[in-house]
Each structure stands twice: as structure tokens, then as C-alpha cells.
Amino acid sequence: MSSPNEQTVADPAPLGLAGFALTTFLLSAANAALTKGAADEWVGYAFFYGGTVQLLAGMWEFKRNNVFGATAFSTYGGFWLGLGFFITHFATVKGENVTNDLGWILLAFAIFNTYMLLWSTQVNMAVFLVFLVLEITEILLFIGFFAGNTNIIKIGGYAGILTALLAWYASAAVVGNNVGWSLLPTGGKVIKVGASA
């Protein structure tokens, strides 16, 4: 039984996943050259949904003592805030150097994502697939930006759309499980460390 002073926090993972999914979807649609606007439809959502809301989800994961979730959501919340700030404050004055800068940014996050991908094997299959396809997306994008190759960037955009769909699925599965409507399985651990034979 919990004490009267104990604070409980609902699972913030579906909120963080949804914020990540929507913002990734919008940016990826622009990278895939599917949008008709100025290709910056995603920037406002980078600040408020992918950035701020995901950062909040990360802080709530700390409250729940979930180091993986806290690290993932807080880092990608910071990613979206930083990327939005970079695009609105530096990209317009840096000219052709922007693609090189984006390459370095995506390479840095691909490095972070690599070890998070490894640890995601201990969460569930749905989360593992999000990190796996995100890894592919980031690799394609940093190669595309370094090479200045719009075709590779477009392929990275389509991979990002798949990443977003997987994140939305994982979000929907957790919400469904929480309300007692467990139709969307998340799967067990991908690799069972220390499991007895």
C-alpha cells in the first residue's frame, strides 16, 4: 500500500512515443519530398510536441525510475528542440553549410541511438523496432546530407515515415493496454539476458 505522501505518475511512454511519432512523420514527409509547402511544416511541432512534450515525458520517466525511457525521451526531446532552433536561427544564414551541419547532427544522434538500440532489446519488440528503423533512418540521412544526395535523403524520409508509424503503434499499444483493450501486442524482450536454460 502506498503512503499518503507518495506521488504516482501514469506511464508517460505513450505520450513520448506519440510526440516523437508525429514530429518524425512531418519531418520525414518533408525529407521524402511529399509535402507541398516550404518543407518546414514540422518546425512548430519540433518545439512543442516532439520537443517540449517529449522532454516532459522523459522527466516523468525519471519519476518512475525508468532510466531507459527517461534517457530516450529526454534526449530526443532535446533533439527536436535543438533541431528546431538550428533551422530557425542558423540554417538561413549558413547557406550550403547547412547540409554538412545536418549530417554531423544526425551522425551524433545515430551514435546515441546505437547503444539505445542495444538496450531496447530489453524493453519489448515494439520499442526495439522503433529504435532499429530509427537507426536506419539516421544513417541514411547523415550519409545523404554529407553527400548532398537528395535521393538518399528521400529514402531516409520514407524510412522516417516507417519509424513514425512504428512509434505510433507502440504508443497505441501501451494506451490500449492501460485502458484494458489489449489488442495490439508489444512483444517480449528481443534478447533475454541472464535467462536460465
Image (spheres, rainbow, N blue to C red):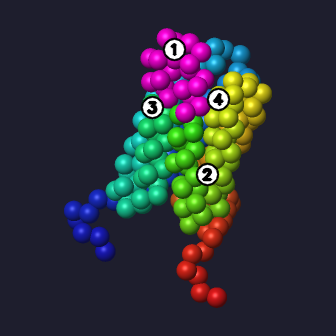
Q: Amino acid at mark 2?
A: Phe
Disc with the residue nearer the chain's start (3 vs 1): 3
Which callout, 2 or 4, points at the residue further toward the start of the chain? 2
Q: Which residue is mark 2?
A: 131
Placement of 110 over or under 178, stated as above or below: above
Distance Cα–Cα, label 3 vs label 2: 20 Å
Q: Which of the two labelled residues, at mark 4 and mark 1, occupies the earlier sequence position?
A: 1
Tag 4, which secondary structure? Answer: helix
Q: Do the residues under discs 4 and 3 have CB atoms within 8 angstroms?
A: no
Q: Which residue shows up at 47% across the image and 55% down it?
A: 69
Mark 4 vs mark 3: which is more N-terminal? 3
Query: What percent of the width, then of the height, locates residue 72?
Result: 48, 50
Q: 124 or 131, which is in the foreground?
A: 131
The quarter in which the N terminus is drawn is bottom left
Q: Nearer the viewer, mark 2 or mark 1?
A: 1
- Label 2 element class: helix
23 or 180, which is in the foreground?
23
Q: CA distance from mark 4 to mark 3?
A: 22 Å
Q: Earlier in the sequence, mark 2 or mark 1?
A: 1
Magenta-drawn segment: 83-104
List the residue tagged with mark 3: 81
Q: Is residue 185 visible?
A: yes
Measured in 3D between alpha carbons, the distance from the residue under mark 3 to the one under mark 1, in whole angstroms, is 19 Å
Amino acid at circle 1: Lys
**Pointer 4 residue:** 146
Q: Look at the numbered discs 3 and 2 and tell me whether their residues touch, using CB distance below 8 Å.
A: no
Q: Residue at x 52, y 48 (%)?
A: 112
Q: Which residue is mark 1?
A: 94
Q: CA distance from mark 2 to mark 4?
A: 22 Å
Amino acid type of the residue that numbered disc 3 sits on in the rendered structure: Leu
Q: Is residue 81 above or below residue 58?
A: above
- Residue contact between numbered discs 4 and 1, judged by CB atoms under 8 Å: no
